[in-house]
């Protein structure tokens, strides 16, 4: 299949480093007859369509509603906006309200969110137990893909059942000078250069680095889905202590992958990338800022922020993007060199997109894989995110689903947005994304 010249997504781009473990609990089933005037049906629709910011705002207006279903949506919203203790309490309360002979309609979805809340809070054993419960109790409802996915997650988190949650120790903030967007991480007496990637649901260590460190590998082999949808093999490992700037990170979980899955990336002459710092470690820092002039700022304590415009889809950060009055959920991926739009955006604006551009084919790269994807290219995409108005040129609109998040979210914000501001900040305590 021919690739359009000049627009092929390069295998050596940072997008090739993005890794995702699928966490969705399967097809979300709405009531058979939605009633527009029914507030619970309204919440269900917003949740199904990943309109999470509208879900949060609508839910906040329904405090007096006594419906048990509200416990599910409170739990789901708390999970999305990183209030994991509150999410677990609400989801358990919802599940406790079901009788053995008449399960509530959102029971499987609640268990999936509960497994995810346990996972993100470092309660790996409970997360694995929740996955096994879903497999045993709802086996008849699961298709082959979801069964494989949940078995895989059971293996991952069972292998880490006795590992404590990661912690960060910092007495003062760090200002780290990036080299080609990479920074040094010290493990034992060795220094490895890594990149940080908000699109990576697990941190990654190359096999050669794990071998040098003599790290024990946990559990049997597992399968991880790359950004192009291909499943690849890996093993889990735990780094008891590592240093990043002034920070000491303990109990850092890494996925170990063979070096040949990755394009060789030279930080500078004689120095190559050996790992990726993913979201579980990044969120433990509470806040970090990347500047356009190549610095990574990590404060000892996060600054309180009033705007809550960032959430999570599993481990993947999502942000609210405003476009022509619509509130759209986009993933936020510092491992992608460019912003691009997903099939839900294409379907919503299909007539205009097809009138403004021709369908063409590109090659999209991922870890150990590449695939052809049919796209349109918009001359300009104007929107507001992080408190700033942005206009990007030559934006790809993907017409085909390449990954679970591209089926539900409207797009991905990539590193090209940093070219229109001086710095971008991720505050995982206030759940704020700020461009300045």
Image (tube, rainbow, N blue to C red):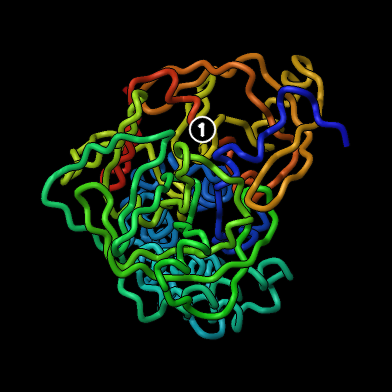
When the figure is inspected, residue 64 is found, relative to residue 10, above or below; the finding is below
Residue under pointer 1: 414
Residue in front for this viewpoint, 166 or 235: 235
Q: Tally the marks.
A: 1
**Residue in the picture at 58% in, 41% down:** 15
Q: State which quadrant residue 162 falls in.
A: bottom left
When the figure is inspected, residue 224 is found, relative to residue 396, above or below; the finding is below
Crowding at label 1, few (<14), some or many (≥20) Cα neighbours within 10 Å? many
Residue 291: x and y in percent read 33, 28
Residue 102: x and y in percent read 56, 79
SS for callout 1 = loop
- Residue 338 visible in the picture: yes
Considering the image in quadrants, where does the C terminus appear? top left
**Residue in the picture at 42% in, 36% down:** 181
Considering the image in quadrants, where does the N terminus appear? top right
Residue 184 vs residue 357: left or right?
A: left
**Residue in the picture at 71% in, 66% down:** 145
Q: State which quadrant residue 223 falls in.
A: bottom right
When the figure is inspected, residue 192 is found, relative to residue 26, above or below; the finding is above
Residue 85: x and y in percent read 29, 64
Residue 161: x and y in percent read 40, 80
**Residue in the picture at 68% in, 48% down:** 228
**Residue found farthest to the left:** 171
**Residue found farthest to the front:** 270
- Residue 332 visible in the picture: no
């Amino acid at each position: 299949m021919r690739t359009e010249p000049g627009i092929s997504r390069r295998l050596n781009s940072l997008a090739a480093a993005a890794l995702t473990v699928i966490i969705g609990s399967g097809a979300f089933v709405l009531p058979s007859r939605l009633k527009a005037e029914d507030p619970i049906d309204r919440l269900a629709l917003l949740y199904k369509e990943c309109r999470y910011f509208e879900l949060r705002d609508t839910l906040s207006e329904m405090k007096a509603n006594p419906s048990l279903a509200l416990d599910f949506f409170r739990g789901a919203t708390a999970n999305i906006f990183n209030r994991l203790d509150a999410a677990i309490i609400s989801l358990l309360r919802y599940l406790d309200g079901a009788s053995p002979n008449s399960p509530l309609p959102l029971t499987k979805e609640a268990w999936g969110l509960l497994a995810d809340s346990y996972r993100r809070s470092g309660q790996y054993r409970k997360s694995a137990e929740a996955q096994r419960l879903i497999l045993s109790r709802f086996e008849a409802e699961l298709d082959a893909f979801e069964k494989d996915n949940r078995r895989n997650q059971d293996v991952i988190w069972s292998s880490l059942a006795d590992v404590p949650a990661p912690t960060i120790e910092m007495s003062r903030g760090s200002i780290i000078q990036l080299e080609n967007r990479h920074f040094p991480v010290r493990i034992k007496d060795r220094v490895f250069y890594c990149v940080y990637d908000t699109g990576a649901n697990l941190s990654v260590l190359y096999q050669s680095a794990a071998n040098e460190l003599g790290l024990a590998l946990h559990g049997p082999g597992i399968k991880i889905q790359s950004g192009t949808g291909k499943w690849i093999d890996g093993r889990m490992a735990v780094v008891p202590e590592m240093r990043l700037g002034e920070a000491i990170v303990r109990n850092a979980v890494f996925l170990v992958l063979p070096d040949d899955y990755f394009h060789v990336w030279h930080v500078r002459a004689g120095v190559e990338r050996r790992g990726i710092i993913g979201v579980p470690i990044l969120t433990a820092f509470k806040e970090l800022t990347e500047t356009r002039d190549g610095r990574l700022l990590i404060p000892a304590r996060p600054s309180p922020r009033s705007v809550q415009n960032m959430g999570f889809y599993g481990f993947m950060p999502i942000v609210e993007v405003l476009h022509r009055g619509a509130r759209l959920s986009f993933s936020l991926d510092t491992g992608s060199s460019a912003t691009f739009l997903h099939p839900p955006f294409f379907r919503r604006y299909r007539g205009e997109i097809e009138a403004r551009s021709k369908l063409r084919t590109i090659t999209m790269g991922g870890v150990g894989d590449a695939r052809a994807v049919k796209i349109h290219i918009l001359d300009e995409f104007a929107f507001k995110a992080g408190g700033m108005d942005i206009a990007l040129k030559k934006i790809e609109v993907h017409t085909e689903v390449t990954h679970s998040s591209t089926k539900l979210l409207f797009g991905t914000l990539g590193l090209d947005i940093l070219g229109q501001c001086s710095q971008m900040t991720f505050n995982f305590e206030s759940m704020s994304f700020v461009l300045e």
